Image: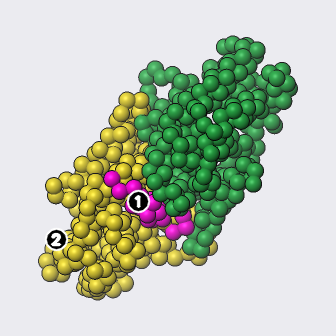
Chain colours: A green, B yellow
Amino acid sequence: MDPLSRIEQALNAAVGQAEAPGCPPRLAAAMRASVFPRGARIRPRLCLAVAAACGEDAPGLTDAAAASIELLHCASLVHDDLPCFDDADTRRGRPTVHRVFGAPLAVLAGDALIVLAFQILADAAVVAPARLGRLVQVIGRSVGVPRGIVAGQAWECESGEIDLAEYQREKTGALFAAATVAGAAAAGHECEPWRAVGLRLGEAYQVADDIRDATGSAEALGKPVGQDAAHDRPNAVAQLGLDGAIDWLEDLARRAVAAVPPCPGQSALRGHILSETTRLLPVELSRHAA
Amino acid sequence: MDPLSRIEQALNAAVGQAEAPGCPPRLAAAMRASVFPRGARIRPRLCLAVAAACGEDAPGLTDAAAASIELLHCASLVHDDLPCFDDADTRRGRPTVHRVFGAPLAVLAGDALIVLAFQILADAAVVAPARLGRLVQVIGRSVGVPRGIVAGQAWECESGEIDLAEYQREKTGALFAAATVAGAAAAGHECEPWRAVGLRLGEAYQVADDIRDATGSAEALGKPVGQDAAHDRPNAVAQLGLDGAIDWLEDLARRAVAAVPPCPGQSALRGHILSETTRLLPVELSRHAA
């Protein structure tokens, strides 16, 4: 099965647990709306690519790790969109979960997705129980305290001089690092050397997001463009120009490639990373980059 | 070390992870305010009592299981108190987390506590990795979908004829069942037979809460009394009279005692359950019950 089908199947099975008898139907619907229709699934695809490069031997556990990371990503989007944070109306071109189901169910759907992310890991790890502890640690660290995505979001609530752009980058990097490290851990590979790969790719994703915000169309992006300029936020294109930002993106991709640890599928993974990074750009610019 | 000191020490170490360098200080403060000062810690004390009765051999893992359940309980209180749910001003006689830190940090503190609950399990399970999967499953089930406390809370967001009192009971029962089942699992004991003990004690706790609501003082309870009558909610005292409610509580305690599976500390645990149930009542009524 191709990677995207594996991911959608694992996510569908996970969300399906909310559709079992006894579960409030609107909670189940809010959870499904948080996870489907799909976004780019960039983090779980990275997780699967790393596991494959490490010679995966427990594909069900890889799928669970990838789905776990995507569930946590979706939970963070639903909570970030809440009226008390961004008060966003649309996400992926659709009304946000709290606009459709109300803020209470948006809070609870996020909570339930966080719990579900750990439940599916435990369920899948019966085939390789010795790997569960590391997976829970790696994925938990990327989400919780002191430096996971929840902590990154909380910097917006601090007073005083805070470099929010720095924390935004850290927040993006945290889940990308989880994707590479958990991919290796699910395959029973030594996993910490994979952190640098994820961090570089998280940075590259942030630069690509800056480029799309500065050059893209709202339709292609699924959210309003020009937000960095409108909110006076730092943006790689504003700082370096378009060519400079593309150069930086390519440099980050090369550094991610260079950081790939020795593994059976090292060379294929390197090719995958380069082509994925090009895909992050709008079509007309990716031709430019190629 | 006595059980309560073990619990406070484990919770303090857990929340201390939020006070590491790099964590937003107000998030850390909101998490600490969610967990301390302590409530009755009734669920973690039950977890420790069951593990002891099973002949616990991995006390660090028991402590983590007990703390995990309490962190999840605290997270659910912080989210339930939010303006979009109960909009509560006080909890345990103090201003609620969102009143002190604002709704955004209350959402994030709850999220971070949920993640932390699984992180501390994984950290502690290095001494007995084979027990981690069951612990994550048991505790996750009590919180998530389809029938954990988050799902229980979500019934308030459904339309149509819903027996909220029934779901309230289920919600209370879920974490009590987690406390008994996880206590046995942390000790490496066969754990599912312990579910019935937790469910009966959860019901007993609910009846005791009804009695306190109908007869207690707001000071002793740490929250307003007479809420069931004010909101036309079912209450055991209204349905059965005070004596009838106390009889029911005692009957539930006896049924919990009868459900205790064979284990090395069976007789001591039975005594513990009976004395704990008596402690649930206001002092003047516990004399009446004795």
Main SS, magenta residues: helix
Q: Is residue B252 visible?
A: no
Residue stretch in magenta: B127-147
Q: Which label sits on residue B283?
A: 2
Residues at discs 1 and 2 both on one chain: yes
Q: Which mark is residue B130?
A: 1
**Residue type, numbered disc 1:** Ala
Residue shown at the point (43%, 63%) measured from the top left:
B134
| Amino acid type at image mark 2 | Val
Instruction: Please tell me whether mark 2 sits on a helix, a strand or a loop.
Output: helix
Give me the residue at 66% from left, 14% from top. Answer: A239
- Disc 1 crowd, CA 10 A, few/some/many (<14, 14-19, 20+): some
Q: Among all residues in the image, which is located at the extreme front? A: A264
Residue that appears at 65% across and 57% down = A10
Residue A216 as seen in the image, left or right of residue B280: right
Residue A18 seen in render: yes
Q: Chain of mark 1?
A: B
- Pinpoint residue A196: horizontal percent, then vertical percent: 55, 29
